[in-house]
Image (spheres, grey):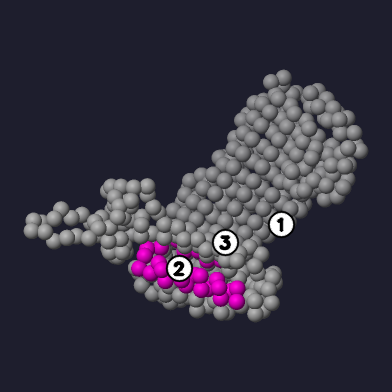
């Protein structure tokens, strides 16, 4: 019924502890000859930096440091939730879980714990035990602490959470070892005098009760932070932090009800945002490798312009808008460009009446683009053949670096066809053009309709139109 895992490092060559005997001549004693519990006590007194240095001296030292570090993982059995039991049975099950954890924690007393992980439904009878377990992990110099809790009543947000015990982190030494904190369904409210986690590298918060002020306090002294993830942490305000994140590499903001995202970063590599359409400004000098942006609903042109102003240094951009509004023209009154953008992926939920309004000219903001993907998803069961009134192409503009074009959800709309022709005629370096009738963005509900529409005829018609345009014989064309 209960899963619990205890792991410790054990190399193939075992160095056993041996007593030191007194002899008339001075013995040639070594540190590794001491009993194992004594070795662990000695190692536990060393700072983390010294332990790391000692572990590279020799294989014996690596073993000595390894035998003292434990990885503890405690999770409730899958499917064993409050809904699965009567009240008395559930209390018995929870008590068994508590007893298991307490026994293991007691057996690991005076040992060094590298990781401490607990996952269970939050019940008030867990409160004191959770505090004791966190205290144990901190006093054992744990590098990683993960507390994944969930409400007993699912989909309820107005219930009490476990309050993270900041009072147990009342000394600098207790915080100096922490490198990773992962919390779910927890209230994270640091005291005003809290000075942050100096060694923290990863902070992962999901469904955590925290304010922007609290977050600023927690991150105030995290100069080594490399990973920050906020998922369903309802800030209801701007996510704007003024201090510089000099080491941050990965940033995730998902469903946080924020009205703006603005951070000062230096080395950010990946950024993920999912939620309402809000201004996003990441101030940094270096290039941003990957950005995945998902807006619930937005005007496509406004969203694209906002990203052009907020993350102009991105190299690979995925923009998904669940339901978007398109305008006939895309105003190019903004002189900025995605000068580093090489890969652009657009995932578009489009209404029937707007399917021919795709803004051709947005590509002019990405002069060095090499790979373009567009994934359409219609909002109804209509096949869009010959839908749309058609319009004149924008002025010619060569995309000299574009080598690959991939479109899914093609339904024969005039706007889709015009865009494909436009790409063919303005991409002299094009090598591969792939057009797929099925849609990739959402679950495809139109397969039966495709069979009724004589799909082969539509494929032939599209291939014929593209081949009659300025499609080079060197281009590999695939229509499916």
Q: CA distance from mark 1 to mark 2?
A: 46 Å
Label 1 CA crowd tier, 10 Å (few <14, some 14–19, many 20+)? few
The answer to whether residue 187 shows anywhere in this view is no
Picture quarter containing residue 332?
A: top right
Nearest to N terminus: mark 3 or mark 1 = 3
Give the farthest residue toward the left: 24
Q: CA distance from mark 2 to mark 3?
A: 31 Å
User: Is residue 175 placed above or below 317 in the rendered structure?
Assistant: below
| Residue behind mark 2 | 104
Left or right position of 386 against 165: right
Residue at image location 71% in from the left, 30% down from the top: 433
The image quadrant where one finds the C terminus is: top right
Left or right position of 11 against 152: left
Depth check, mark 2 against mark 3: the one in front is 2
Location of residue 48 in the rendering, given as x and y in whole percent from the top left corner: 33, 59
The foreground one among 430 and 444 is: 444
Is residue 306 one of those drawn in magenta? no
The image quadrant where one finds the N terminus is: bottom right
Label 2 CA crowd tier, 10 Å (few <14, some 14–19, many 20+)? some
Q: Which element type, helix, strand or loop, lies under badge 3? A: strand
Residue at image location 88% in from the left, 37% down from the top: 451
Disc 3 to disc 1: CB gap under 8 Å: no
The foreground one among 63 and 325 is: 63
| Residue behind mark 1 | 296
The foreground one among 267 and 106 is: 106
Location of residue 69 in the rendering, given as x and y in whole percent from the top left corner: 38, 59
| Residue behind mark 3 | 230
């Amino acid at each position: 019924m209960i899963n619990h895992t205890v792991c410790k490092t054990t190399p193939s060559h075992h160095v056993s502890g041996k007593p030191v005997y007194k002899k008339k001549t001075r013995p040639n004693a070594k540190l590794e000859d001491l009993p194992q519990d004594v070795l662990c006590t000695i190692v536990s007194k060393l700072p983390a930096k010294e332990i790391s240095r000692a572990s590279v001296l020799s294989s014996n030292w690596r073993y000595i440091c390894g035998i003292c570090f434990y990885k503890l993982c405690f999770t409730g059995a899958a499917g064993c939730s409050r809904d699965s039991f009567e009240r008395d049975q559930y209390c018995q099950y929870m008590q068994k879980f508590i007893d298991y954890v307490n026994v293991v924690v007691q057996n690991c007393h005076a040992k060094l714990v590298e990781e401490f992980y607990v996952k269970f439904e939050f019940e008030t009878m867990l409160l004191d035990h959770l505090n004791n377990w966190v205290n144990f992990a901190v006093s054992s110099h744990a590098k990683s602490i993960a507390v994944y809790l969930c409400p007993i009543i699912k989909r309820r947000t107005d219930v009490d959470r476990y309050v993270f015990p900041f009072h147990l982190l009342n000394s600098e030494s207790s915080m100096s070892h922490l490198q990773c904190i992962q919390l779910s369904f927890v209230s994270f409210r640091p005291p005003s005098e809290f000075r942050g986690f100096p060694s923290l590298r990863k902070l992962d918060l999901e469904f955590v009760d925290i304010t922007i002020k609290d977050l600023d306090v927690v991150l105030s002294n995290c100069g080594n932070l490399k990973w920050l993830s906020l998922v369903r942490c309802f800030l209801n305000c701007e996510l704007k932090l003024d201090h510089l994140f000099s080491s941050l590499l990965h940033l995730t903001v998902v469903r946080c009800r924020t009205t703006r995202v603005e951070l000062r970063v230096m080395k950010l590599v990946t950024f993920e945002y999912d939620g309402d359409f809000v201004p996003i400004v990441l101030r940094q000098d270096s290039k941003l490798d990957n950005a995945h942006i998902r807006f619930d609903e937005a005007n496509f042109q406004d969203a694209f312009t906002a990203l052009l102003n907020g993350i102009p240094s991105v190299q690979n951009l995925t923009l998904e808008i669940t339901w978007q509004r398109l305008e006939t023209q895309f105003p190019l009154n903004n002189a900025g460009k995605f000068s580093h953008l090489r890969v652009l992926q657009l995932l578009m939920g489009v209404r029937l009446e707007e399917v021919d309004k795709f803004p051709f000219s947005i590509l002019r903001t990405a002069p060095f683009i090499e790979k373009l993907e567009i994934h359409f998803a219609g909002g109804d069961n209509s096949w869009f053949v010959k839908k749309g009134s058609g319009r004149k192409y924008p002025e010619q503009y060569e995309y000299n670096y574009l080598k690959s074009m991939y479109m899914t959800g093609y339904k024969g709309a005039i706007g889709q066809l015009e865009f494909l022709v436009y790409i063919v005629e303005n991409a002299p370096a094009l090598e591969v053009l792939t057009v797929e009738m099925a849609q990739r963005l959402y679950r495809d509900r139109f397969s039966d309709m495709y069979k009724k529409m004589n799909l082969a005829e539509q494929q032939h018609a599209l291939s014929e139109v593209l081949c009659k345009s300025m499609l080079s014989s060197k281009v590999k064309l695939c229509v499916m």
